[in-house]
Amino acid sequence: MVLDRNIYDNLITELTKDAVTLVAVSKIKPPGDIRKLYDYGQRDFGENYVQELVEKQNLLPGDIRWHFIGHLQRNKVKYIAPFVFLIHGVDSFKLLKEIDKEASKNNRVIQVLLQVHIATEETKFGFDENELEDTLKQADALKHIEIKGLMGMASFSEDQTQVAREFQALSELYKRHQQAHHFSILSMGMSSDYTLAIANGSTMVRIGSLLFGARTI
Ligand SMILES: *Cc1c(COP(=O)(O)O)cnc(C)c1O
């Protein structure tokens, strides 16, 4: 599908009212599509696969802020450590340690979000409440990462009450830790549920298909 400028502009207007940041999720979409949105003014893009992200980063303008939003394997951190802007889905302390190590090698501090498991599906990743607390404590020792906040994905469900409840739970968890850990980013909401996410306190939405059209694979 074509990238409709009106859809983009209207979305930005809507998000700006609530001071919400848009991460345009460009996974599987060609670099030309990203370039088009870039020309509309978009700078934050999200990718799920390491190799694809590295290839696109090489081809596209250097002022793009690349977000890694997929499930990151420890042995692949090194490929994105030189340039990644924010890693959303950190779901283990081991992964956090690896990011810290690779950030140090690159003389960087890498910004991350800890992923919290809020959905009913077991297949989704993330910490539970207690693991989150332990991880935040342990992370104090890591000097090359900065935990900016939390990320979560709601259940894949038509039940709006259920989805809202999950966002609310994550938002409460976020608020509980916000001051002590200087959190500023709560990443929740996708094409199908971003309005509910914003109503429940999201500060950053990850939107793909609404902008780029449905993914065929
Ligand atoms: C693909 C993906 C999105 C975007 O999904 P859409 O439904 O296309 O908006 C957001 N977050 C994550 C983690 C994703 O993998």
Image: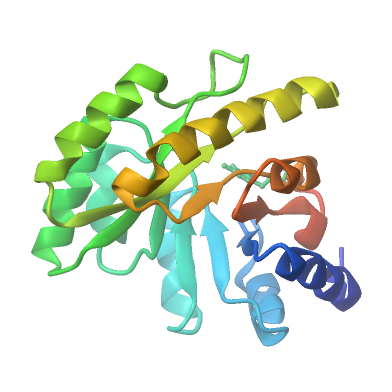
Say which of 101 and 32 sits in front. 101
Residue at position x 40%, y 58% from top? 86
Q: Which of 50/81 is in front? A: 81
Say left or right for 210 vs 135: right
Q: Quadrant of the C terminus?
A: top right
Say above or below: 128 vs 203. Answer: above
Expressed as whole percent of the image width and height from the top left, the position of residue 116 reads 46, 29
Rendered view: 56 above or below 157: below
**Horizontal and vertical percent position of residue 201:** 64, 46
Q: Position of residue 66 (x, y in %)?
A: 46, 66
What is the number of callouts on the image?
0
Q: Quadrant of ligand 1?
A: top right
Q: Position of residue 118 (x, y in %)?
A: 56, 23
Question: Foreground residue, 45 or 199?
Answer: 199
Please report the residue visible at 63 percent of the width from the left and 59 percent of the height from the top. 26
* In this view, 4 is above or below 208: below
Q: Is residue 183 left or right of residue 204?
A: left
Residue at the (37%, 48%) spot, across then down: 179
Q: Quadrant of residue 121?
A: top right
Is residue 195 in view from this perspective? yes
In the rendered image of this protein, does residue 120 appear above or below residue 168? above
Identify which residue is drawn at 65% across, 32% down. Answer: 167
Which quadrant of the view contains residue 6? bottom right
Query: How is the rendered protein coloured?
Result: rainbow
Image quadrant occupied by the N terminus:
bottom right
Q: Please give left or right for residue 159 compared with residue 78 in the image.
A: right
